Amino acid sequence: MLRYIKLHGGDELIGEAADDSQEFDVKIELKHPWRMVPTPKGYATLPIPAKSLTVDTVCVLALGEVDADLEAAYMEHYGRLVRPPQDLVIPH
């Protein structure tokens, strides 16, 4: 499951978290983590050069799921199946 994590220090991360992660876990492991960087036009994503990253939950300010567009970009980067946008119109 692709997760979004905002840390107390202000860093924003996304990555694949194990489906069995529970809210009471002390650590969250993100596989293939990316850092979200604010720009004048929105956010840019920067892959972190690590296979996985472990985050202590005491450092987490917010935790959630990512939107479909960001998930598609992430999956395309790692060569996985990408779903087309739901508002895609195919002419007849």
Image (spheres, grey):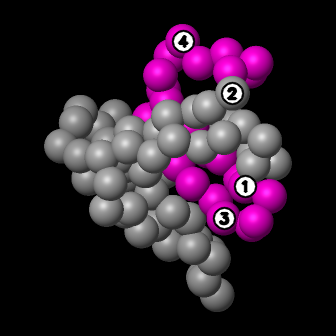
- Most distant residue in the left direction: 79
Residue, disc 2: 26
Q: Kindly indicate the quadrant of the structure image that contains residue 23.
A: top right
Crowding at dot 3, Cα within 10 Å, few <14 / some 14-19 / many 20+, comes out as few
Residue depicted at 72% across the width and 37% down the height: 57
19 over 26 or under it: above or below: above
Residue sitting nearer the eye, 62 or 52: 52
Number of marks present in the image shown: 4
Residue depicted at 22% across the width and 36% down the height: 80
Residue depicted at 34% across the width and 34% down the height: 83
Instruction: Tell me, yes or no, whether the highlighted magenta stretch contains residue 3.
Output: yes
Badge number at residue 59: none
Residue 76 position, x and y percent, is 26, 48
Secondary structure found at label 4: loop
50 over 44 or under it: above or below: above
Q: Measure the C-alpha gap from mark 4 to mark 2.
A: 13 Å
Mark 1 touching mark 4, by CB under 8 A?
Answer: no
Badge number at residue 7: 1
Badge number at residue 11: 3
67 left or right of 52 in image: right
34 over 20 or under it: above or below: below
Q: Measure the C-alpha gap from mark 1 to mark 3.
A: 5 Å
Secondary structure found at label 1: strand
58 left or right of 70 in image: right
Residue, disc 4: 20
